[in-house]
Image (spheres, rainbow, N blue to C red):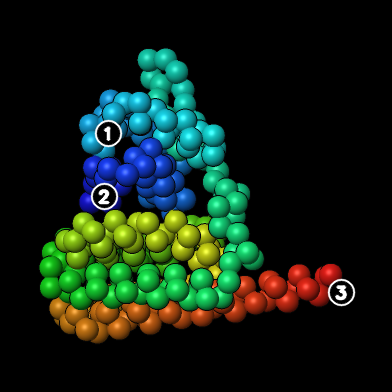
Amino acid sequence: MTHAIIFAPIGQASRAEQIVTRLANAIMTGLLQANEQLPNEAELAKMLGVSHITVREALNTLRAKELIYTHRGRNGGSFVCDSIESRAHHYHPLSLLSSDYLLDLGEMHCAVLAHSARLAAKRMTDEELAKLSSLVNDFQQAESSELRAQADMRCLLSLSASSQSARLATSELSLQTEWASFVALLYNDDAIHQHSFQTYRELLGTLSQQNGDAAAKSISGLIMRLTEQLVDYKLNINSSTLGSMS
């Protein structure tokens, strides 16, 4: 389902930029994994509903951003780079964002996931629930902040995909462009990681009971708590910067 979302047809406006954004989102959040091979240009053009020239332009941009690399020859193709952590900070300069911006991002993310949870509680299959449970276990076992953030994003995308709404799932993937890198900063803290895991366990319980309102409340609480912690993190960064300048 996640790859179906990533490679769903592109809309009409700024097609090359849309492809760059969508694939960069998937790479930054770990949905497309290190050294994973992308479909070839012809396959991408067909899957995304665009021309070969548009695909080539997008891939050239991704190469310039050092998010993918290309091998020539019989077994060649385009592959995801194996180290993107430094690019995450380049794309998401937290210190340059306002607290209002972070709060607005959190509220939008909360709205998308809350409605996704309500629909998922009614629509998700037993197989999808088992898959989400497995992803939550992966999240619990992740040890580094980057791996925790990537596992977290897979959980959130799985939840939105289980809503059976392509628009909600696509919106979630787009939001993860910024969110994943921000949350990775927080997941250096084991207590924050543990609290998020416990919330996911509660969410699984509400989904298994098909309690949409409780599921929405659970995921909303998690996102807003993380948003508030991001604002605190930003304020601490600013305070440290001012202190070093005085």
Amino acid type shown at disc 2: Ile
Residue drawn at the location 24% of the way across and 69% of the way down:
116
Amino acid type shown at disc 1: Val
- Are the residues flagged by discs 2 and 3 in contact, CB closer than 8 Å? no
Q: Nearer the viewer, residue 147 or 64?
A: 64
Of all residues, the one furthest to the top in this rendering is 73
Left or right of 64 in this view: 6: left
Residue drawn at the location 45% of the way across and 18% of the way down:
72
Q: Earlier in the sequence, mark 2 or mark 3?
A: 2
Q: Nearer the viewer, residue 126 or 221?
A: 221
Residue bearing the label numbered 1: 50
List x then y, in percent, for residue 223: 41, 75
- Establish if 192 lies above or below 54: below
Res 39 label = none
Of all residues, the one furthest to the front in this rendering is 13
Dot 1 crowding, Cα within 10 Å, few <14, some 14–19, many 20+: some
Residue 159 visible somewhere in the drawing: yes
List x then y, in percent, for residue 124: 15, 66
Residue bearing the label numbered 2: 5
Dot 2 crowding, Cα within 10 Å, few <14, some 14–19, many 20+: some
Of all residues, the one furthest to the right in this rendering is 246
Residue bearing the label numbered 3: 246
List x then y, in percent, for residue 196: 43, 75
Amino acid type shown at disc 3: Ser
- Establish if 24 lies above or below 214: above
